[in-house]
Image (cartoon, rainbow, N blue to C red):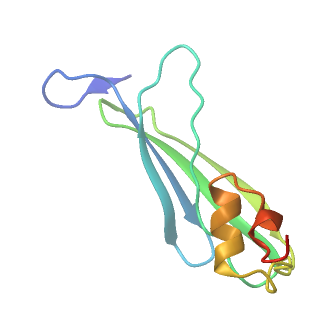
């Protein structure tokens, strides 16, 4: 049976993601749940390629005995090479503000 904890407040949940192999907490977010709720948790993945087991815990901050946990495997591949090594900061800044980097050339 569900039992409320403490005083009256808005019902919320904590979404917690952890790595199973080293008990590392990698993401934490408070979520207000309605009929259907979607949320996004971002976290860094291990640098070494391989398969890692993570768990996501949904923990009620209002009710006891309703927490949920699911595990999932995440496959980490080789990192993609950065092909922008030959670009300079001026080109990257120009592109970020919507200026064509080619228009920065001195030749006209």
Instruction: Kindly give the residue lying farthest to the front in the view shown.
Output: 108
User: Percent x, y for residue 85?
Assistant: 79, 85
The residue shown at (63%, 76%) is 21
The residue shown at (32%, 24%) is 11
Q: In the image, 76: left or right of 5?
A: right
Choose top left, top right, bottom left or bottom right for residue 86.
bottom right
Q: In the image, 58: left or right of 81?
A: left
Asked if residue 45 shows in the view, the reply is no
Q: Quadrant of the C terminus?
A: bottom right
Choose top left, top right, bottom left or bottom right for residue 106.
bottom right
User: Percent x, y for residue 93?
Assistant: 63, 67
Residue 60, placed above or below residue 9: below
Residue 90, placed above or below residue 39: below
Of the pair 59 and 10, the residue shown nearer to us? 10
User: Percent x, y for residue 55?
Assistant: 61, 56
Q: In the image, 25: left or right of 94?
A: left
Instruction: Kindly give the residue lying farthest to the left in the view shown.
Output: 7
Of the pair 27 and 85, the residue shown nearer to us? 85
Choose top left, top right, bottom left or bottom right for residue 14.
top left
Q: Quadrant of the N terminus?
A: top left
Asked if residue 20 shows in the view, the reply is yes
Residue 90, placed above or below residue 4: below
User: Percent x, y for residue 30?
Assistant: 39, 41
The residue shown at (78%, 58%) is 100
Residue 56, placed above or below residue 46: above
Q: In the image, 26: left or right of 108?
A: left
The residue shown at (54%, 13%) is 35
Of the pair 89 and 75, the residue shown nearer to us? 89
């Amino acid at each position: 049976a569900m039992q409320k904890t403490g005083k009256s407040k808005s019902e919320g949940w904590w979404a917690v993601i952890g790595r199973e192999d080293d008990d590392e907490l990698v993401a934490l977010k408070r979520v207000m749940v309605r009929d259907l709720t979607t949320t996004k948790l971002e976290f860094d993945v291990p640098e070494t390629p391989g398969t890692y087991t993570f768990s996501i815990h949904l923990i009620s901050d209002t009710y006891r005995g309703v927490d949920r946990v699911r595990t999932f495997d995440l496959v980490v591949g080789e990192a993609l090479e950065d092909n922008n090594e030959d670009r300079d900061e001026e080109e990257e800044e120009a592109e970020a503000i919507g200026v064509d980097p080619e228009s920065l050339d001195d030749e006209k």
